[in-house]
Every structure is written in C-alpha cells, then in structure tokens.
Image (tube, rainbow, N blue to C red):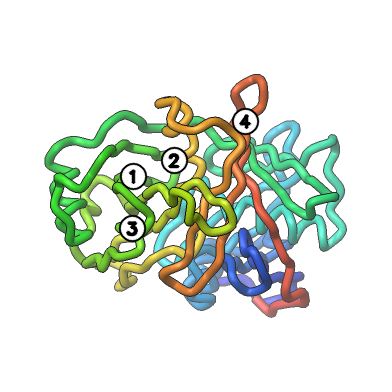
Amino acid sequence: MRARSSSRPFAQVDVFGASPFRGNPLAVVLDADGLDEGTMRAFASWTNLSETTFVLPPTQEGADYRVRILTPSTELDFAGHPTLGTAAAWLAAGGVPAGERIVQECGAGLVEVRRDEAAGTLAFAAPPLRRGGPLEAEHVGAAAAALGIDPGAVRGHAWVDNGAGWCVLELGSAAEVLALAPDLAAIPARKIAALGVVGPTGTDGADGAAYEVRGFVAADPESGTAGYEDPVTGSLNAGIAQWMLERGALTPPWTAHQGTALRRDGLVHLDVDADGTVWVGGTVRVDLRGSIDI
C-alpha cells in the first residue's frame, strides 16, 4: 500500500548554465525518508525531467546524505548534474557537511563534492570508469548510422561508462557535432543507454571551450519513454575528460560546452588534482524552493 502523502521540502535547480535558465534542470525531493518505491518512480515520471533526485539518510560511514537518482523510466547509480544539483539544494536547505567537502552516497558509492564560494561553483570528483576502451566495430557502425554520418568521419571512439552507460564518438570539429541530425530511435541501446559526441571548437569555441558536446539518450520502448538530447551532462563530460587525459589530448584545466543545439548554454569546467582526481564543475542555481505534497 502506498504511504499517505505528506508535505516535503522540494527544490528545482539549474545546473551548468552559463546564465540563468540555460543549463540542465533537476527536481530534488529533500526529505524522501519513508517514501515507497512506487511513489518515487511516479513522481520522477511526472516531473518529466531527465532526472529527479531523492535525498535520504546515509547508510555509509562518512556520507552526509544518500541520494537516489531516477529518470522517468529507470534508476541511475551515478549522474553528474544530479550530483551537483542535489548538493546545491541540500546546502540551500541548511545542510552542513561534516568535513571540508560534501560527501554524497549513491549507487556508485561515495562521491565528493567541493565548493568554490568565490566562483560560485560546485565540482564533483569523477568516479572511475566501469568500462573504458574502444568501441566494437559493429557498435561504431551502428552509432554512426544513428547519427547520420559515415563511419569514416569518426576520428576516435571509446566507452566512457561511469555508471550512466555513456560511449563517445569524436568528430573533426564542433561544426560537425552541431550539424548532426540523429535518428534517436536508431541509437544502439542494446549495450548502452546513451551516446555522446565531441568535436574540437578550434579558435571559435564558446567562451573559450576546448570542444562541443552533444549527448543523446535512446528511447525505452518498455516504459514508452522517447529518445531525447540531454542539455548538459556531467557524467558524460567526466568520462570524456578521463578519456582525453588518458590519451594526453588536452592539458588541464579546460572547459567544455554543451547545449547549443537546444538553445542552452552549458559550461563544464574540468580540472585534475596532483593525485589524478578529475573534478567536473560548473554553476548551480537553486531557482525554486518550496514544498511538495507527495
């Protein structure tokens, strides 16, 4: 039986936007303790956002809180913009981390989030890849076909899966990335849930960005969820950064741009500590605060 609805603190957050309302929105239920599975899934479907998060008491030592990350059709072990958005909403609601950094517990384990109060940004420590290495030839062909390009246009490719299922194809320029007109129904979802594309911006990059990114999510016929393009994607950008560093393709720090094709303006800042930790950050704005009867 579903638990009786109650009023709970709620926030809607805009993550990675270079200016207000130009990033990736997120819904956050700040006190989800006691909510049953069916209610969470129904609410995540109702918000119709790429992700909705639910904040719960931690179960692992050292965590400040636990989060569940739900899409309209499934649950993710990890996702980037929900990690930063949840941390920002938790802080705005009066959350106080036990240590210098916020420590979030999620399906991928413990993820650290650090604050740069002067810059007004948050950044998460990228979790290790669950799957890396080049794509299979068959998968490259299927992905290229879904994007409407010749496989010969692909300059590089890799799995960059840190819990969200991403792979990446590298094209020759940002212009090629922005010209894509993908068939979202044809994205090869047999092995992955999403497809990322990156191309260098050259000297014309948005706000000095090193490259332009687009991320496409396959349709889910079981739930009836249509395929879509994600506005700004922290987990994909984290995986791309790890791939760039592995190849020595870029020297940190750098900035990636995403969202142009959707009239968004997402800026993702990438940096690396001396110990090799990749940090993925950007601006987070808590745009709406109140309560939700759920």
Tag in front: 3 or 4: 3
Which of disc 2 and disc 4 is earlier in sequence? 2
Classed neighbour count for the residue bearing mark 1: other residues with Cα under 10 Å, few (<14), some (14–19), many (≥20): many
Which is nearer the eye, 25 or 64? 25
Up the image or down, 248 lies above or below 261; here it is: above
The disc, 3 or 1, on the residue closer to the chain's N-terminal end is 1
Question: Could you tell me how far apart the alpha carbons at marks 4 and 1 are, in whole angstroms?
Answer: 20 Å
Residue annotated with mark 1 = 168
Q: Which residue of the protein is positioned furthest toward the top in this rendering?
A: 275
Instruction: Give residue 27's position: percent from left, percent from top.
Output: 62, 68
Horizontal side of 280 relative to 196 (left or right) equals: right
User: How far apart are the alpha carbons under marks 3 and 4?
Assistant: 26 Å
Category of crowding for the residue at label 4, using alpha-carbon neighbours closer than 10 angstroms: few (below 14), some (14–19), many (at least 20): some
Which is nearer the N-term, disc 4 or disc 1?
Answer: 1
- Residue at which label 2 appears: 240
> Between tags 3 and 1, which lies in front?
3
Count of labels in the image: 4
The amino acid type of the residue labelled 2 equals Ile
In the rendered structure, are the residues bearing label 2 and label 1 in contact, judged by CB atoms less than 8 Å apart? yes
In space, the residues marked 2 and 1 are separated at their CA atoms by 7 Å
Residue 1 shows in this picture: no
Q: Tell me the tag on residue 177.
A: 3
SS for dot 1? strand
Q: Label 3: state its secondary structure.
A: helix
Task: Give the distance between the C-alpha atoms of the residues marked 3 and 1, in whole angstroms.
Answer: 12 Å
Say which quarter of the image contains residue 221.
Answer: bottom left
On the image, the x and y values in percent for residue 208 come to 57, 52
Residue 79 or 115: which is nearer the viewer? 115
The percent position of residue 288, horizontal first and vertical second, equals 73, 76
What's the residue type where badge 3 is placed? Val
User: Mark 4 highlights which residue?
Assistant: 272
